[in-house]
Image: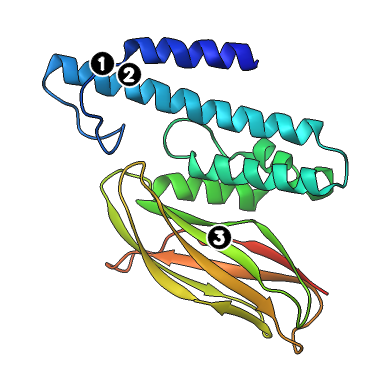
Amino acid sequence: MADLARRAVGAAHQLAVDDEPSADPLGPPQVDGVAAKGAAARTVLDRLTRNIDIALADRRIGLAPANSSELDAARREYRALVHRNRFNGVCLPNVQAWWRWNGPAGQTPYDDATVRRDVADSYAAPAAGFGDPGFLALVRDGDAAELVVEAQDVDFTGHTVHWTATAPDGVVLEPASGTLKVHGTRGAAAAVTVRATAGAATGAQRITPDFGLPDGTVLVPARVEVAVS
């Protein structure tokens, strides 16, 4: 597999020309034939690289020992990569992918309405967002954890995305809101510090990052599961 990946990347490099790279491999087409050829080669190389990253993350899930920190890290990486590449033609965060990053204990029926509806609604929206990781373990009055809120341009027209994250009582988010500018394949992210106070309820909780546009358009919210002990 690694040899095949190297050969594919090498082939894409052969297509490249020595012109100045554009900021966005999916930017507007260029009239000049040589420049267009270079842009096409960079797009091919970009897509190959993204696919290889996802395949390697999937492989790490399969090789990691059961119930290990390596498995948790591999699942988090796979989930983040699938979400970051869901609107550029690389992958689809369907129910099978959902199983892969959650593991057998988190499996859901194939006709799970929530997963399927969120996927369809996200692709129909002008922009979208998600939280990374999708699960946080917190200890009351313990160390803080980091949540990354990310936004993406779905229709590739450029957007300013406002986000606000809500958490259960006793779970503190700093900051709890912000603004992200996205365009084409260039997403944007904000780091959020999450901690549980002594008054937080133990057990399963949920943080909900909500997303919207300046014109009032409401986007699909994200869900981040939290376990407080």
Q: Amino acid at mark 3?
A: Ala
Determine whether label 1 and label 2 are within 8 Å by CB. yes
Q: Amino acid at mark 2?
A: Ala
> Label 2, on which residue?
41
Label 1 or label 2, whichever comes before in sequence order: 1
- Report the coloring of the rendering: rainbow
Label 2 or label 3, whichever comes before in sequence order: 2
Q: Please name whichever residue, 120 or 26, is drawn nearer the observer in this view of the structure.
A: 26
Q: Residue at x 59, y 64 (%)?
A: 147
Q: Residue furthest left?
A: 31
Quick one: quadrant of the C terminus? bottom right
Disc 1 crowd rating (10 Å Cα; few below 14, some 14-19, many 20+) is some
Q: Residue at x 72, y 67 (%)?
A: 226
Q: Amino acid at mark 1?
A: Val
**Mark 2 → mark 3, Cα distance in angstroms:** 34 Å
Residue 2, image x and y in percent? 63, 17
Residue 108, image x and y in percent? 75, 46
Quick one: quadrant of the N terminus? top right
> Does residue 218 sit above or below 69 in this rendering?
below
> Label 3, on which residue?
222
Determine whether label 2 and label 3 are within 8 Å by CB. no
Residue 19, image x and y in percent? 20, 23
Which numbered dot is residue 17?
Answer: 1
Quarter residue 201 falls in: bottom right
Quarter residue 217 falls in: bottom left
Tag nearer the camera, 2 or 3: 2
Res 163 seen here: yes
> Does residue 10 sit above or below 178 in this rendering?
above
Q: Residue furthest right?
A: 66
Res 107 seen here: no
Q: Residue at x 79, y 49 (%)?
A: 106
SS of the residue at dot 1? Answer: loop
